[in-house]
Image (cartoon, grey):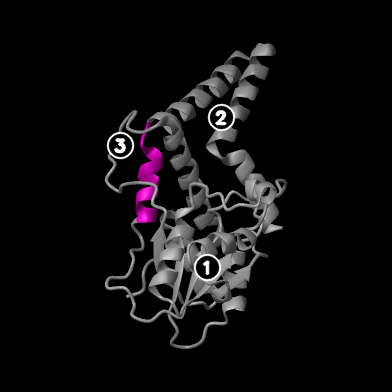
Amino acid sequence: MFFVLSKIFWFVANPLSLMFLLLIAGLFAVALRWRRIALASLGLCAAIFVIACWTTLGALLLHPLEDRFERPAPPPDDVTGIVVLGGGLEGGVNLVRGGYELNRGGDRFVEAAVLARRYPDAKVVISGGVGSLILEGATDAETAPRLLEALGVSRDRLILEGKSRNTYENALFSRERADPGPGETWLLVTSAFHMPRSVGLFRKVGFDVVAWPADYRTAGNEPFGLARDNALDSLGNLSVAVREWVGLFAYYLTGRTTELLPAPQV
């Protein structure tokens, strides 16, 4: 139920959908000559459009998420395994074409391949099922082995987890498949903005991991301003940031994490 409700909520609440719904409501109000409602709906739609596409608000909301966890320095000498969370592959394309096309989050798998080469004895857990209510696609657990093998990672090192539909299930099912033992070191690879929520969920299910963020979306020093980035990138950053902050609150309020904004352990 949580999975379904979260998808429905985000379908309505993401900035692009919200703008569309406000536009439809405004046009409907114009047709019915409800002037105040029309002005309010269309004005709010225009305001969201300008803020989302032509300001750095999205980047500013991403900064505290991306800066929350840093890669360990120096890196650990011995690593038992690497867990890479799905979301970096074009499932719909790969289902039809059988390749390993990457999307904007594909750095997760590139970084996982780099780490697998650095730690040749480490297992690699690929966690990612189908996270869509409607669209069909190949799971990352199905596609990623082709990519990693092409990059020189032996298939016998891979542990595939293709049931998870969200980050909570990533953590739960990865722990089941990896079966980590005391004193072992497991690296967690996911997008930097996604790392706080991911670490909180892994801690909750009893899987201690070392954060290894990848796929940064910002430089980290963007000031607030107008027209400082491509409009589509700005809109994408805001959508990602809003979704991640909403996810942090939702998981905290439902008891899936014990911290609103998980931090590195001292």
Residue 69 in the image: state x and y as whole percent: 36, 63
Type of amino acid under label 3: Phe
Residue 19 in the image: state x and y as whole percent: 56, 29
* Horizontal side, residue 70 vs residue 240: left or right: left
Q: Is residue 126 above or below residue 47?
A: below
| Label 1: how many Cα within 10 Å (few below 14, some 14–19, many 20+) | many
Q: Is disc 3 placed on a helix, strand or loop? A: loop
Residue 252 in the image: state x and y as whole percent: 53, 62
* Horizontal side, residue 247 vs residue 216: left or right: right
Q: Residue at x 56, y 40 (%)?
A: 14
| Residue 53, picture quadrant | top left
Which numbered disc, 3 or 1, marks the residue that appears first in the sequence? 1
Q: Is residue 189 above or below residue 20?
A: below
Residue 82 in the image: state x and y as whole percent: 47, 72
The residues tagged by marks 3 and 1 sit, at their Cα atoms, a distance apart of 31 Å
Which numbered disc, 3 or 2, marks the residue that appears first in the sequence? 2
Which numbered disc, 1 or 2, marks the residue that appears first in the sequence? 2
Type of amino acid under label 1: Leu
For the record, the magenta segment spans 55-66
| Label 2: how many Cα within 10 Å (few below 14, some 14–19, many 20+) | many
> Label 3, on which residue?
224
> Label 1, on which residue?
201
| Residue 214, picture quadrant | bottom left
